[in-house]
Image (cartoon, rainbow, N blue to C red):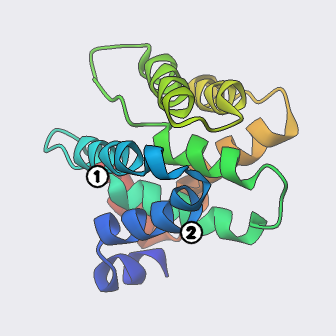
Amino acid sequence: MAEQLETLVDPADYVLYALEQVVAPLLTDDKQALGYQFMAETIENYSQDDRSYHTLAHIMDCLQQLETYREREDYVELFLALLWHDEIYVTSRRDNEELSGQLAYDRMQQLGLDGAQTVRRLIVSTASHVPQQEDEALVCGIDMSILAADEARYAEYTHQV
């Protein structure tokens, strides 16, 4: 289904729409422009040519899976963690998650959003995929859900990696 949806919905459009629905309403009027700047940077970073799997399609898939948890009190933190967990992606580095977590933390501080420390912790947990808390298990499970995908989708993933 995710593969079919990807062909029907542009991942950049989906991510922008999701950001507008979840994040923009939380921003004060004086932070809206900065929020849209960060949204554009996020989309640009995930759209870099050197990415194989850590792309907007992966983020779209993660955010779609998170939808079933929309009623959770920590939904915004989970959303932002999944959104930004792979934003820094340099294949020669081993600290991409730490850098992505710091970027998320800094952005949330600049935007005046609560939960920056939680989002950073959730992102860093995706480095080892050995969650210590329930929210980490949820984020890591969604991030790694490709491993349980149907055979065709999984074959596409292994080709990308």
Q: In this view, does 5 lie to the left or right of 98?
A: left
- The image quadrant that residue 112 belongs to is top right
Question: Mark 1: which secondary structure?
Answer: helix
Question: Mark 2: which secondary structure?
Answer: helix
When the figure is inspected, residue 50 is found, relative to residue 68, above or below; the finding is above
When the figure is inspected, residue 32 is found, relative to residue 41, above or below; the finding is below
Residue 101 visible? The answer is yes
The amino acid at mark 2 is Gln
Q: Where is residue 161 in the image (x, y as percent from the top left)?
A: 32, 43
- Residue designated by label 2: 64
- Residue designated by label 1: 159
Q: Is residue 123 left or right of residue 91?
A: right
The residues bearing labels 2 and 1 have C-alpha atoms spaced at a distance of 22 Å
Q: Which of 110 and 43 is in front in this view?
A: 110
Residue lying at 82% horizontally and 67% vertically, measured from the top left: 71
- The image quadrant that residue 140 belongs to is top right
Q: Is residue 69 left or right of residue 29?
A: right
Q: Position of residue 117 (x, y in %)?
A: 69, 24
Neighbour tally class for label 2: few under 14, some 14-19, many 20 plus, Cα within 10 Å: some
